[in-house]
Amino acid sequence: MPDAHQPADPVGSAAPYDALLLLSFGGPEAPEDVVPFLENVTRGRGIPKERLVEVGRHYFLFGGVSPINAQNRELLAALRKDFAEHGLDLPLYWGNRNWAPYLVDTLRELAADGHRRIAVLATSAYAGYSGCRQYRENLADALATLAAEGGPELRVDKLRHFYNHPGFVEPMIEATLAALDRLPAEVRDGAELVFTTHSIPTAMASTSGAPDDPARGTPGGAYVAQHLEVAGLVAAAVARATGAVDRRWQLVYQSRSGSPQIPWLEPDVCDHLETLHAGGAPAAVLVPIGFVSDHMEVKYDLDTEAVAKAAELGLPLARAATVGADPRFAAAVRELVLERAAAERGAPVRRRALGALGPSHDLCAAACCPNPRAPRPAAAQS
Ligand SMILES: CC1=C(CCC(=O)O)c2cc3nc(cc4[nH]c(cc5[nH]c(cc1n2)c(C)c5CCC(=O)O)c(CCC(=O)O)c4C)C(CCC(=O)O)=C3C
Ligand SMILES: [Fe+2]
């Protein structure tokens, strides 16, 4: 195993890639965007009407503006800066699944600019249908549209999952320590760590990951195994830094939608805060390891709803920042591009990953993270 703390080669070639595409979820930027955005997100997904009205309300509370697009613009700026500082001359593009700039428009632009082989970073760190295959299905749809228009053939390679990359984990450790510091000194040592991620249907969780992943088929599948790995890494590092070696932590879930009859991953974060309070916990720190930036799931479900729950309980609570545009994450993206480029050229590759699960595969298998409804074409797979 290579030493996880050694940086990858500082300079390298991005060949065979012509460009990097940042592929994200997208979000509304004005009140009149909210309903069309939600229609884009939920087309054909059987989400109850009441849930959509409720989620729309979350966006209207913030003036109809999701923070996610501004956060992606910041990440693009951080990537431009990092690439320039490291002499990596690779054009950067940005497209979204559910709002402007739309993926299909960005692919058209890439094609018009003469780019043919494109590395893709999806702003989703973990395995699973929603975080991986759905992005690849949208890539396949957009490529099919371009082909139907008579455009040139593009090849898109999605970069590996980065949940256990040190450039993603280390900022979260630092953010957790900073959140602990914001708690009153008298409750700090006893504060429990509450790692949160998006709940998904348990059926989707248990089929997440590659077919040969040992976690595949376990109740939480690779989705839960990967989150537990990150939570454990952050908890251990925090314990080392604060000396409170027996600090308790748990992985919990948020932002559940869908029909109440269908089982989703539990417990919910607000229920967990009640459990902690009932058990005598003096304080808690929320660590949203499932999300790359402080988008609406973080701003509403944690900073609004969970904060209100903690206030009602009288439980001191602090929320750790997400990775966002941290320069270490930008550097990790550069490493992932250079790593994959080297692998595609057949050159030696160093793949940094913390913990025991190892670096994720470059190419998803056809049976990775299946679509829970019906199989559909997906790009970037074997
Ligand atoms: C695993 C996961 C991630 C993390 C990985 C990743 O980042 O991709 C994620 C991210 C996000 N989810 C987002 C928004 C929404 N997700 C929804 C619905 C759903 N998400 C699901 C899962 C995930 N979602 C699932 C299983 C559903 C049910 C319907 C379906 O099977 O598809 C709905 C519909 C209403 C509702 O049900 O809540 C909305 C509005 C935003 C944008 C936030 C902003 O605007 O700032 C982001 C970053
Ligand atoms: Fe979502």
Image (cartoon, helix red, strand yellow):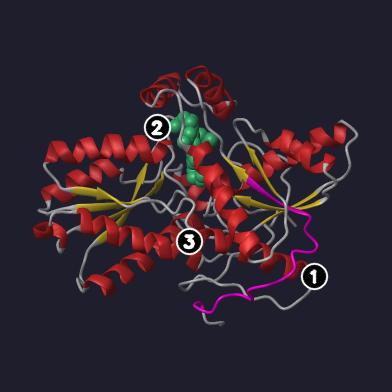
Mark 1 = which residue?
A: 345
- Secondary structure of the residue carrying tag 3 is helix
Q: Is mark 1 within 8 Å of ligand 1?
A: no
Give how far across and how far down residue 282 sits, in percent.
12, 54
Dominant secondary structure of the residues highlighted in magenta in the image: loop
The residue under the point 21% across, 74% down is 243
Give how far across and how far down residue 29 sits, in percent.
51, 27
Q: What span is in magenta?
A: 4-22
Is residue 13 on the magenta stretch? yes
| Quadrant location of the N terminus in the rendered image | bottom right
Task: Tell which tag, 2 or 1, sits nearer the viewer.
Answer: 1
The residue under the point 18% across, 58% down is 191
Q: Nearer the viewer, residue 249 or 152?
A: 152
| Quadrant location of the C terminus in the rendered image | bottom right
Mark 2 = which residue?
A: 261
Q: Is mark 3 within 8 Å of ligand 1?
A: no
As shown in the figure, which amino acid type bears the numbered disc 1?
Arg
Does label 2 or label 3 sit earlier along the sequence?
A: 3
Mark 2–mark 3 CB contact (< 8 Å): no
Is residue 275 on the magenta stretch? no
As shown in the figure, which amino acid type bears the numbered disc 2?
Gln
Task: Tell which tag, 2 or 3, sits nearer the viewer.
Answer: 3
